[in-house]
Image: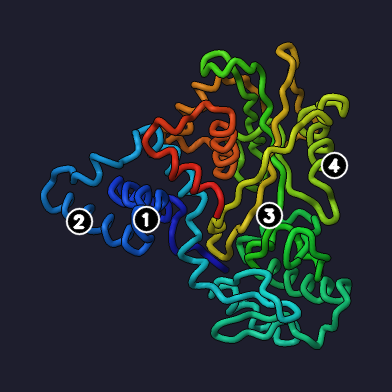
Amino acid sequence: MYTNRHTRANRRKRSLATPCLMAASLLALNGCIGWRGAQMLGSHAASREMATGSSSPLCRAFAPTPRMRGLLNRIRDCNDGADKFREGRTFIVDGHPVGVVLPIAAKELARFPKVFTVSPTAVELAPDLGTSPEARSAAVGDVLQTLRKAGVPMLKGWRDEAWPVKTSFDAPESFVVERASAPIFGIRAYGCHLNGLTGSSGKLDEDCLWVARRSKTKATYPGKLDHLVAGGLGNNEKPSDNIVRECYEEASIPAEISEKARPAGLISYIQQDESEWGLKRDVIFCYDLDLPKGFKPIANDGEVESFDLWDIEKVINSLASDSKEWKPNVALVIIDMLIRRGYLTPEESGYVELVGSLRQ
C-alpha cells in the first residue's frame, strides 16, 4: 500500500515566494542583475525583514501589488515541481531524453529490468525491446498494469487513453502509455484549453468569461472551476480538431461556432502530481472563442456540472484571492488571456514577472 508523505497544501506553502524574492526576481527579469544574484539579494532582504519586523526597501520598491502577488502565487502553485525536477533521473529512449523520473518511481521501475534499465542518474527504456512502438507500448503497459494492481496512487485515475512518448511535439512517437501514467515518466503532455468569451469592450465589468464547474465524479480535481472547454491532446490528434471535438462533447457547441476559435499561443509548467509519484510537464495550447451574448453552453458528456458567465473583474478577483476552487492549470491559461487582451497592464507592479512566469 502506497501513501503520501506530505499534503499538497504543505508543498504549496513551501513553494510560495516572499515579496522580497518576487522583487529580486523582477530585477533579474529586467536585466538589472543575474538570477543567482537575485536569489541571494532576495533571501538577504527576506532574512532582514524577518529579523527586524519591518519591510525592506527592496520589497517596498519592487514588490508586486497584492493582486499581482495573488496571480503570481497561482503560477507558482502550478510550478511546484521545479525542485523535484532537478532531483529526478533522466528518462531516456533511443539515446534521447524524453522525461524525468522521480526517485520513488525509479525504485519501482527497477523491479522490471527487462523493460527499464535504472541507474543513479537515469532510467532508460531497455534496448532489447527493439524499436517497434507496438512492442514497446505492450511491454511498458504490462509494467503499468502491475503497478496499478499494486496500488500506485497515481494510477487510480486510469482512463484507457493512449498518450504518446516522443522527443518533441512534431516528432514521431516512440511508444504510447496510459494517460494517467504520464507523470511517472515526466514526459511532455499536450492539451488544449479554450477561453469562452463574450464582449470586447475591454472593460472589466462588461466583458465576460464562461466558467465551468467540473463534475464531482471526475477522477481529478472533482468539483473545481474549469474552462468552458479543455482536454488532453490524444495520440495523433491535431489541436484544432481537439477543440472542435471537445466543444461539442463538453458544452454542446456546434462546429460552425467552435471552428471560429483562434489559437493564441501556449503556456507550460512543471507541477508535481498530487500523488507525489511524478511530474506533470504539460504544454497547453490556448484558444479564444468569442461567443454571441445569447449563447448558453449545455453540458453534454457528464464531465461538467454547470456553466456560469462571470464578468472579467470577478474572474481576476477570484484568481488573485486564496480561493481553492480553481483547477490549477486553468488559472495559468486565464492569466495568459488577461495579459493578451489588455485586462492586465505593464503599469501594475509585478507585470513583467507575471508574463515571464507563464512559460517554464
Q: Say which of marks 1 and 2 sits in front.
A: 2
Residue 23: x and y in percent read: 32, 47
Mark 1 or 2 closer to N-term?
A: 1
Residue named by callout 2? 47
Q: CA distance from mark 1 to mark 2?
A: 16 Å
Q: Are marks 2 and 4 in contact (CB under 8 Å)?
A: no
Q: Residue 69, percent across and down?
A: 38, 39
Q: Say which element carries label 4.
A: helix
Give the mark, 2 or 4, whose residue is nearer the N terminus. 2
Q: CA distance from mark 4 to mark 3?
A: 25 Å
| Residues at marks 1 and 4, CA–CA distance in whole angstroms | 39 Å
Foreground residue among 131 and 339: 339
Residue occupying the point 58% across, 79% down: 107
**Mark 3 Cα shell of 10 Å, populated few (<14), some (14-19), many (≥20):** some
Quadrant into which the C terminus falls: bottom right
User: What SS does tag 1 mark?
Assistant: helix
Q: Which residue is mark 1?
A: 14
What residue is shown with label 3? 157
Query: For this view, does 9 lie left or right of residue 46?
Result: right
Please tell me which of labels 3 and 2 falls first in the chain.
2
Residue 316 left/right relative to 288 = left
The amino acid beneath tag 1 is Arg
Counting from the top left corner in percent of width and height, residue 87 is at 49, 72
Residue at (76, 27) in percent of width and height: 299
**Could you tell me how far apart the alpha carbons at marks 2 and 4 are, in whole angstroms?**
51 Å
The answer to whether residue 12 is left or right of residue 97 is left
